[in-house]
Image (tube, rainbow, N blue to C red):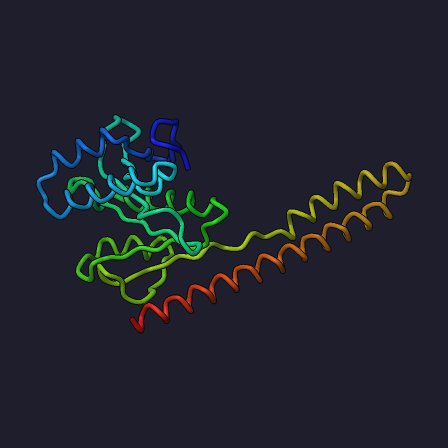
């Protein structure tokens, strides 16, 4: 969550990389875009980014650039900072680069990056009903139908809970080896270490699942309220 004047993250895939646009780059997009609806979208993104400078990366568009020649071929964005553990993504690609998997590649990387943030448990997206290409991208990435949004069908992908058990099993083996070496009884040391690792892993797994269930319930409750409005 960096200010616009500081170094921003670069997200790389096999063929492209994404980096957040500066104010100057967004202004250039606004002045060069002929499509009125798209121009308005860039203006709204710039307005949101300037109003929330500490969260610039969540409001400003990110340019999608080909690694091989540095050509900008599209852009992707989050529609605001995380709210209720969720962020929404939007994207667009230059027509000549559509259908080549670039957007699927970029959207997958951006979704994974969002999930790397502790506060994000859901990534959402909306697509117009007649935009089958956009819907196919979301389906490829494992997004599931989630009702209707302002722009059309809404989709969501949920973060997978961290598997703490194998992590702490390895930790337990390391502890057991240390105990066994210091006591001269490797078998007892390993047994103790594995038991410690399993106990810690099981406890963290349980807490993670419980937290996710609570977050999911709150989200469903909020959706029900919104649908009644």
Identify which residue is drawn at 78% across, 47% down: 193
Query: Residue furthest toward the bottom?
Result: 228
Name which quarter of the figure residue 133 lies in: bottom left
Q: Is residue 2 left or right of residue 210?
A: left
- Report the quarter where the N terminus lies: top left
- Spot occupied by residue 194 in the image (x, y as percentages of width and height): 76, 50
- Spot occupied by residue 137 in the image (x, y as percentages of width and height): 29, 52
Q: How many labels does the image show?
A: 0
Query: Residue furthest toward the front?
Result: 51
Identify which residue is drawn at 84% across, 41% down: 179
- Spot occupied by residue 19 in the image (x, y as percentages of width and height): 33, 33
In this rendering, the answer to whether 5 lies above or below 42 is: above
Identify which residue is drawn at 40% across, 57% down: 157
Query: Residue furthest toward the right?
Result: 184
In this rendering, the answer to whether 171 lies above or below 161 is: above
- Report the quarter where the C terminus lies: bottom left
Q: In this view, does 190 lie to the left or right of 17?
A: right
- Spot occupied by residue 156 in the image (x, y as percentages of width and height): 37, 59
Q: Choose between 66 and 84: the one closer to the eye.
A: 84
Name which quarter of the figure residue 127 lies in: bottom left
Q: Is residue 107 left or right of residue 129?
A: right
Q: Choose between 52 and 197: the one closer to the eye.
A: 52
Identify which residue is drawn at 11% across, 34% down: 32
């Amino acid at each position: 969550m960096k200010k616009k004047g500081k170094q921003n993250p670069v997200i790389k895939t096999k063929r492209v990389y994404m980096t957040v646009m500066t104010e100057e780059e967004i202004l250039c997009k606004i002045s060069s875009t002929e499509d009125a609806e798209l121009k308005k979208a860039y203006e709204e993104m710039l307005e949101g980014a300037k109003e929330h400078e500490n969260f610039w990366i969540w409001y400003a568009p990110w340019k999608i650039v080909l690694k091989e020649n540095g050509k900008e071929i599209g852009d992707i964005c989050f529609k605001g900072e995380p709210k209720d553990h969720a962020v929404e993504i939007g994207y667009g690609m230059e027509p000549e680069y559509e259908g080549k998997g670039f957007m699927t590649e970029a959207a997958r990387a951006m979704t994974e990056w969002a999930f790397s943030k502790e506060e994000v448990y859901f990534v959402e997206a909306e697509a117009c009903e007649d935009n089958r290409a956009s819907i196919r991208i979301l389906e490829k990435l494992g997004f599931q139908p989630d009702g209707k949004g302002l722009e059309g069908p809404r989709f969501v992908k949920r973060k997978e809970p961290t598997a703490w058990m194998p992590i702490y099993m390895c930790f337990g083996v390391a502890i057991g080896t240390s105990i066994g070496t210091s006591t001269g009884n490797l078998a007892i040391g390993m047994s103790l270490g594995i038991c410690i690792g399993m106990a810690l892993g099981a406890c963290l797994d349980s807490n993670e699942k419980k937290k996710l269930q609570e977050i999911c319930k709150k989200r469903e409750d909020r959706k029900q309220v919104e649908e009644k409005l």
